[in-house]
Image (cartoon, coloured by chain):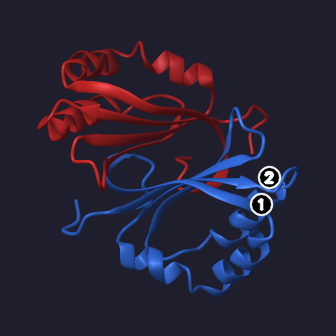
Chain colours: A blue, B red
Amino acid sequence: ASAQPLYGLIGKMKAVSGQRDALIAAILEGSGSMPGCLSYIVAKDADDVDAIWITEVWDSEASHDASLQLPAVQASITKARDLVASMETGVVTAPVGGVGLKA
Amino acid sequence: ASAQPLYGLIGKMKAVSGQRDALIAAILEGSGSMPGCLSYIVAKDADDVDAIWITEVWDSEASHDASLQLPAVQASITKARDLVASMETGVVTAPVGGVGLKA
């Protein structure tokens, strides 16, 4: 375990109707190579055809904040902006362990 | 990408007051070696001192269901049961990609 706590986010957003796949594609394009990112998983909500969930684990809040300035992430945000209808749940967590945290 | 969709769960539960760390320990004990589990992350809620979040990705719903019969998971459930005050949010998802899915 590292000395500083991990930083996690669990967020739900709704795509503009019919644009969920395009939104997912835009998000995944930007998230492939983000320093300090230990997990970043995009999922479709099983019950709501317009909703997606993003669950994230970072080695620090600073790494998360810095990722927002990466060119690939900026490009992704620009593409995604018009595809998002609303932001719903947003929770901050302190991940403590498990399976699937990138080394 | 595999032919069959991935199976995801996002759940929140509240520990009996003061028992969050014990609950987390019980859950992590059981989750180290689960076939078909691509990601299983336990996190403390940053705002609620009794709450935890578990975010899971499985290669299929069947793998998830089968995990509940593993001896280590059964032992974990037995330990955790008395430490849980309530189950809160529970969402089923279809994860589609990202960083940190175990190969």
Q: Are marks 1 and 2 in contact (CB under 8 Å)?
A: yes
| Residue A24 image offset from top left, x and y in percent | 74, 57
Q: Is residue A99 above or below residue B6?
A: below
**Residue A59 falls in image quadrant:** bottom left
Q: Is residue A97 above or below residue B34?
A: below
Inter-mark Cα distance, 1 to 2: 5 Å
Split into 4 quadrants, where in the image is the N terminus of chain A?
Answer: bottom left
| Residue A13 image offset from top left, x and y in percent | 65, 54
Q: Is residue A41 left or right of residue B80?
A: right
Q: Is residue A78 left or right of residue B44?
A: right
Chain bearing mark 2? A
Chain bearing mark 1? A
Residue beneath label 2, please?
Answer: A20
Split into 4 quadrants, where in the image is the C terminus of chain A?
Answer: bottom left
Mark 1 neighbour class, 10 Å CA radius: few under 14, some 14 to 19, many 20 or more: many
| Residue A84 image offset from top left, x and y in percent | 74, 62
**Residue A28 falls in image quadrant:** bottom right
Q: Is residue B16 left or right of residue A57?
A: left
Q: Is residue B99 above or below residue B102?
A: below
Mark 2 neighbour class, 10 Å CA radius: few under 14, some 14 to 19, many 20 or more: many
What is the secondary structure assignment of the residue under circle 1? helix
The amino acid type of the residue labelled 2 equals Arg
Residue found 28% across the figure and 36% down from its top: B28
Name the residue at the right extreme: A18
Label number found at residue B98: none
The amino acid type of the residue labelled 1 equals Leu
Label number found at residue A23: 1
What is the secondary structure assignment of the residue under circle 2? helix
| Residue A76 image offset from top left, x and y in percent | 72, 75
Residue found 63% across the figure and 69% down from its top: A32
